[in-house]
Amino acid sequence: MIAPRRFLPSTSALIAFEAAARLGTATAAGAELSLSQSAISRQIKTLEEQLDVQLMRREGRLLYLTPVGKDYADKVRTILSQLASASVHARANPEGGTLNLAILPAFGMHWLAPRLSDFAATHPEITVNLSTRLSPFDFRTTRFDAAIHFGRTDWVGAFHMALMSETVVPVCAPEMLPEPAQNAKDILDHPLLHLDTRPRGWARWFKDHGVTQDVPPGMIFDQFSTMAQAAMHGLGVALLPTFVAEPYLNNRQLARAARHTNDSIGTYYLVWPQDRTEGAPLKAFRSWLGTQTG
């Protein structure tokens, strides 16, 4: 419930009050709204009684706003305008709306953003708003309709739709390694760059390729994009998802440090709250994502 009913006047009373406040007489307000002068007066009186406050002073036929009435009239005018606009929009776009989506920075920048023009072309009635979030959150305390999540199906209170698993590749500045290393162990001869949310990323990669030596520490980053920039400037070898690395590899800002790739331990998911009705924008976006990852 938005508010106690006693604080929610009828739309008719608010429309009558706004017209009288703007035009200065009940007669003029009645003419605009195709109502009698007495009907306008009754609506204003009912509104004042409901709020238990005087909104207007009457001097003959003229109506003057009290200080509280003036402030109330300004707010009512704004609300009525927003309500009218929302009604027009709903009528013009019955299947439209807004989707507020939380995304992981690298996935959003390198995988989702380049594809969103296709969604916009097929669903011009839907506006997608993107905000970055690095870790799970409580849908009940945010405005988000859905989120992109990496890992496992461990987001509490959410439905999960698998998008794709992640393949990683070691990359570095071209001058650091003129040719990709043939043996994964040779990568240990160079500084390694680490992501703070995946502290064992390199250890798992080396283990998958038969290397059991301890992984040396190195620079730590909170996002793939900054780690990629560091690798471009020769600070070390970065382990990047292929969808992050490919643009840099294609324009030769980065080079493969080894020929080996492997699947990551996690999968990307679209998640959305279980305790909320799934709106048309989310349904359309979920269906579209299936065409991009299926």
Image (cartoon, grey):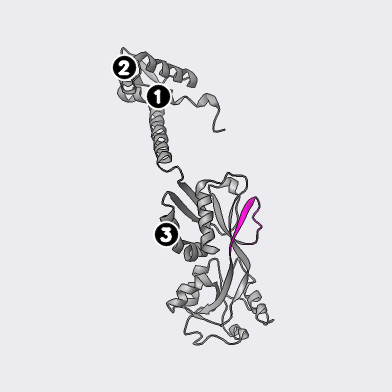
Which callout, 1 or 2, points to the residue nearer the camera? 2
Q: Nearer the viewer, mark 2 or mark 3?
A: 3
Q: Is residue 8 magenta?
A: no
> What residue is disc 1 on?
69
Is residue 286 in view?
yes
Q: Nearer the viewer, residue 73 or 277?
A: 277
Residue 273 image label: none
* Residue pointed to by mark 3: 117
Foreground: 214 or 32? 32
- Contact check, label 1 and label 3, Cβ < 8 Å: no
Residue pointed to by mark 2: 27
Inspect the image, locate mark 2, and give the three-letter code of the amino acid beneath it.
Thr
In this picture, residue 38 sits left or right of residue 203: left
* Mark 1 residue type: Gly
Residue 98 picture location, percent across and down: 47, 48
3D distance between C-alphas at marks 1 and 2:
19 Å
Q: CA distance from mark 1 to mark 3?
A: 48 Å
Q: Position of residue 193 (x, y in %)?
A: 56, 75
Residue 157 is one of the magenta-drawn residues: yes
Which residue type carries mark 3?
A: Ser
User: Element under label 3?
Assistant: helix
Q: Secondary structure at mark 1?
A: helix
The C terminus lies in quadrant: bottom right
Q: Which residues are magenta?
A: 151-164
In primary-sequence order, the first of circles 1 and 2 is 2
Q: Earlier in the sequence, mark 1 or mark 3?
A: 1
